[in-house]
Amino acid sequence: MKPLAWIFAGLLVVALGACGSTTSPNTSNPNPGNPGTPNPSASGFKTAAVLPEGLKDLEQNLSPLLVEAVEIARSKSQNPGTLTGTLTQSGNTFTYSPNPTNRLRVVWSDGVVYEFVITQFQGDLTDGATAFYKGNHLLQFSAQLKPDNEIGPVNLSLRSQRQGSALSVSLGGTAVFDGQTYTLNLSYAQEVLSDFGPGSIKFHHQDTLQGSLQGPGLQIQVNETYDFQLVGSDSLVMQTIRTLNNAWSEGGQQFRLQDGLIKRVFRDGNPIEADFWTASGDLLRNGVRVGGFGQAFTGNLLEQFLDTPSGRVRLGVFRF
């Protein structure tokens, strides 16, 4: 069995890479709209463009992580019903303690602690954690942790249910992002279109993410879709297509990300096929365009960004 760290240290780095966004002064405002209208903080733009995807990807890695933690705890305790206790990492192995008896703690080798309170754990672990999560299951739990990125700490309540090719997930609680605390009420539906193996992989799913994020003076309505494909045998090609139509109010003004489209493709974690990459769509303030998504090469570095009246939000920089 691979150690727990392969999920969070590997998958989460890729999934939440966009959360390394930064905001820089906008010296070439694409459309300032009414120059007499005060600009809101850049934080609102960044939150609307980055946080929903980061939270979805966090859940998609956190639920499999929990299943693997339970699998290891049950193996170490020799108790098929174990859902509590403490797993302590040392190198690539874990030791188990039966305490506490009301939650499952994972103590990483660097001292970071994740805590889970599990209220539903239905599924088949006979063939391991991966088969459990890809099969019919019902997971319901709360989690407290600090992901290794801009999101966190988080205090989440999650529910994941799969029936056949359909996965439905609800995500609530709170998360700190850019120093602000947001209340979450998100749900997404995933339809698996193909999943082949072993020997070769063709994994294709489509997701719809909807709901709301609410923070100080900011309420965001989330409406996003995702198309994810992973294909390969000796090497792996990962393609992602994300659409955004999020709306929010801030400072008495109404904003919308309209027809946002972000496309990326990687081979073994490295960006390829520069012609496929896309970042397009409009940023509207009270119905008037004041910015939008874009991308630009500097040498062999491609930057994807969102231009806003308050500055440029960097969505990622990739080396070709």
Image: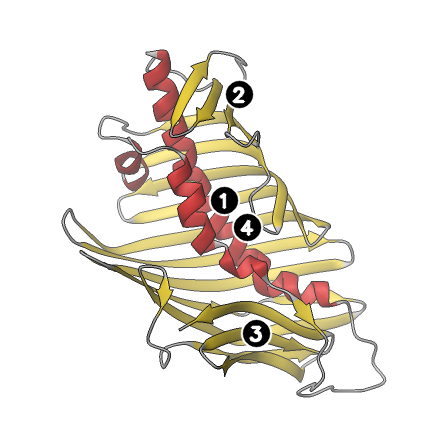
In the drawing, does residue 99 fall left or right of residue 36? left
Indicate which disc, 3 or 2, sits on the residue closer to the N terminus. Answer: 2
* Secondary structure of the residue carrying numbered label 2: loop
* Secondary structure of the residue carrying numbered label 1: strand
- The amino acid beneath tag 3 is Phe
| Marking on residue 186 | 4
| Tag 4 and tag 1, C-beta contact below 8 Å | yes
**Can I make out residue 273 in this image?**
yes
- The amino acid beneath tag 2 is Arg
Indicate which disc, 3 or 4, sits on the residue closer to the N terminus. Answer: 4
Mark 3 — residue?
Answer: 305
Mark 1 — residue?
Answer: 170
In the drawing, does residue 211 fall left or right of residue 199? right
Query: Separation of disc 3 and disc 2 at Cα?
Result: 41 Å
In the picture, which quadrant includes the N terminus? Answer: top left
Q: Residues within 10 Å of mark 4 (few under 14, many from 20)?
A: many
Indicate which disc, 2 or 4, sits on the residue closer to the N terminus. Answer: 2
The residue under the point 46% across, 22% down is 87
Closer to viewer: mark 2 or mark 1:
2
Indicate which disc, 4 or 1, sits on the residue closer to the N terminus. Answer: 1
Towards the viewer: 100 or 243:
100
Residue 88 percent location from the top left of the image: 48, 22
Query: Separation of disc 2 and disc 4 at Cα?
Result: 24 Å
Place residue 2 in its image quadrant: top left
* Secondary structure of the residue carrying numbered label 3: strand
Residue 50 percent location from the top left of the image: 57, 61
